[in-house]
Image (cartoon, rainbow, N blue to C red):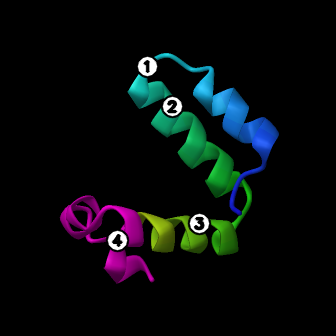
Amino acid sequence: NVINHREEDAVKDITLKSDKATELIDMVINKGPDASSHMITILCEEDRFLSAHLKLQDLL
C-alpha cells in the first residue's frame, strides 16, 4: 500500500475533489520515489484513459 488507513481517512475527510487529489499526491511525493512509482503504476492500471492523457507510462 502507498498510504495507510489514517492517511486514507484524512483524504476522505476533504470535501473538494481537487483538494483531495492535491493532498493525496503530496502524501505520496513525501514518501519518496518508490511510493510515487507505485502510485503511478496503480493509476495506469486503474484509469488507462487518464494515465494515457497524462503520459504516465513515460515516467515508469
The image shows residue 19, relative to residue 49, as above or below, that is above
Tag 2: amino acid: Lys
Q: CA distance from mark 4 to mark 2?
A: 20 Å
Q: Main secondary structure of the magenta part?
A: helix
Residue 14 position by quadrant: top right
Q: Position of residue 9 (x, y in %)?
A: 71, 31
Check if mark 4's residue and mark 1's residue have beta carbons within 8 Å: no
**15 falls in the magenta region:** no
**Residue at 80 percent of width and 37 percent of height:** 6
Is residue 48 rendered magenta in the image? yes
Q: In the image shown, does 43 or 26 lie closer to the viewer?
A: 43
Q: Which residue is mark 4?
A: 56
Spot occupied by residue 32 in the image (x, y as percentages of width and height): 71, 65
Q: Is residue 7 left or right of residue 28?
A: right
Question: Label 4, label 3: how many angstroms apart (C-alpha)?
Answer: 11 Å
**Range of magenta residues:** 44-60
Q: Are marks 1 and 2 in contact (CB under 8 Å)?
A: yes
Residue depicted at 67% across the width and 46% down the height = 27
Residue visible at 47% across and 38% down in the picture? 21
Residue 29 x %, y %: 63, 55
Whether tag 3 and tag 1 are in contact, CB under 8 A, the answer is no
Amino acid type of the residue that numbered disc 3 sits on in the rendered structure: Ser
Amino acid type shown at disc 4: Leu
Q: Which residue is mark 2?
A: 20
The x and y percentages for residue 48 are 26, 68
| Residue 28, above or below 57 | above
User: Which label's residue is closer to the chain start, 3 or 1?
Assistant: 1
